[in-house]
Amino acid sequence: MSFMEFINFHLVPGIVLGSVYAVGAIGITLVFGILRFAHFAHGDMATLGAFIALALVTAGLTPWAALPVAMAAVAVVAIVVDKLFYDYLKARPKIMTVMASLGVALMLRAVVQVVFGVDPRTYATGIVRPDDYFGILLRDRELYTLAAVVLIVIGLTLFLRHSRWGKAMRAMSDNPDLARLSGVDNRKVTMLTWAIVGALCAASGFMLGINNELHSMMGWQVLLPMFAAAILGGVGRVEGAVLGGLIVGIAEEMSIFILPAQYKAATAFVLLLLILLVRPRGLLNGKVL
Amino acid sequence: MALLDMKAVRGGYGDADILHGVSMTVGEREIVVIVGPNGAGKSTAMKAVFGLLTVRGGHIVFDGEDITGWAPDRIVQRGICYVPQVDNVFREMTVHENFEMGAFLRRGDLSAAYDRIYGLFPDLKAKRRNLAGDLSGGQRQMVAMGRALMLDPKLLLLDEPTAGLSPKYMEQIFQITRDVRDAGVSILLVEQHAKQALAFCDRGYVLATGANRHEGTGQALLADREVAEMFLGG
């Protein structure tokens, strides 16, 4: 295998997949860091976002125009889910919220299956030939995916670093008691977090769908790699989630050199086990929960 | 009329009372220290002022208004800020961001407030972009006090500000506390280092088993034989 083949058939798909994982892992790490529980409905929220975008595409929008609308829609869904289920359990032990999120995952998936069916779908039919960029083969959808991920990460980082409410989110993640003593409204931060997390879910689901296909189990199947990415990078760290996502995505695509292709999905699990054994706080020293 | 007037306060965290009738006052521009043996209810008395405790008897009057039973966020807005003993900074935020969070409820131009804080804590000006968690214990305590002062409180509550600090930093924290008082803020603090604290404060209260035991000026308490024997190690 030549070097360019290695890049085009393994590294590029790994980076694309890894960027999608990164977007999902950022959401997981935000919920972990600020709301302090493992959100199992994350993958199925992504599925919902992907299918809302499909509905918009069916109605005539181009896929990339449907993306921001789907992000806004799932942001609202996430806020409503929080108000209906998680908020109700906030005084109870966190494990109850974790279990509730598992139930929400099943509900969201069932809604998708009832409305859209269980057959695989795509945003666009036909085969897209990749363009040649100095030997690197990239399809438009891959290029746009990478660009969108970069924009999302930069936008979110700027928001968290420099805006008043972004700082409030970081403060809540850092030291919730002190944030309350400083007058930060817990409910507003929670709502804002869910809006962002919902939008990120929709984005990751859409990107997964446009680079492959949509089916009702798609989000559930990427939940483990996304969790692995969040924990690998360090819980509560946005830049860690990006790093972790890229590592998991590339590792999955590379795993076929040493493992049969059927074991690709196990790669994330192995990475998760390794990091928990060797460096449980993640590469960038995240929180201990 | 005292700025803070606590009258016969009883209460605790759960069902059992920890405070069995604590009374104290803090005047304008006054440093008042609470000392006493472990388990005397020193920190608990302070938390009662800040609404972190179920008060079952007595009254807490601040600046002419009864604040008994108020929630902490309302008390903050009324002009009392509290610096907890531990976990009192945002470790993963910069020094300056800690101050920004302190001023979260304030709108408008805050440059005068920042100038005031960096004037009180000149050491922190050079470290304003460092993460608070990377600073030394003494400097972290300064960040914690600075964060609380950003809201421009009338009364500052400090829970063992010198715990775990070297004598050098302890002296520095006491000096800053005096500077803060001279800037017009009243201070109520809990101290383990009873001797040093009584020497620098305006007035002091000695608590034991959740009730007042002695009170007076710092010098008078230091000179009191009984206080010296009971709490100051002779």
Image (cartoon, grey):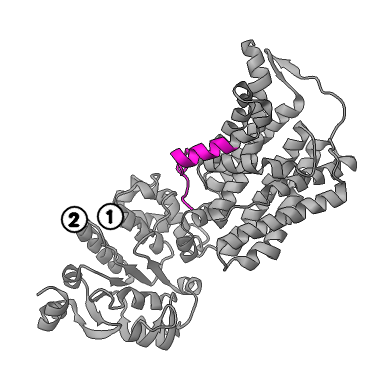
Q: Residue at x 57, y 57 (%)?
A: A35
Q: Which percent across, then down, holds residue A55? A: 86, 45
Residue at disc 2, secondary structure: helix
**In this figure, which residue is indicated by the disc labeled 2?**
B168
Neighbourhood count class around disc 1 (C-alpha, 10 Å): few under 14, some 14–19, many 20 upward: many
Residue A210 against residue B180 in the figure, above or below: above
* Segment tinted magenta in the rendering: A269-289
Q: Residue at x 46, y 50 (%)?
A: A288
Distance between the Cα atoms at labels 2 and 1?
9 Å
Asked if disc 2 and disc 1 are in contact, CB closer than 8 Å, the reply is: yes
Write down the quadrant of residue A278 in the picture: top left
Residue type marked 2: Lys
**In this figure, which residue is indicated by the disc labeled 1?**
B138
The one nearer the camera, B210 or B27, is: B210
Q: Chain of mark 1?
A: B
The one nearer the camera, B130 or B11, is: B11
Write down the quadrant of residue B50 in the picture: bottom left
Q: Which percent across, then down, holds residue A203? A: 71, 42
Q: Is residue A261 left or right of residue A31?
A: right
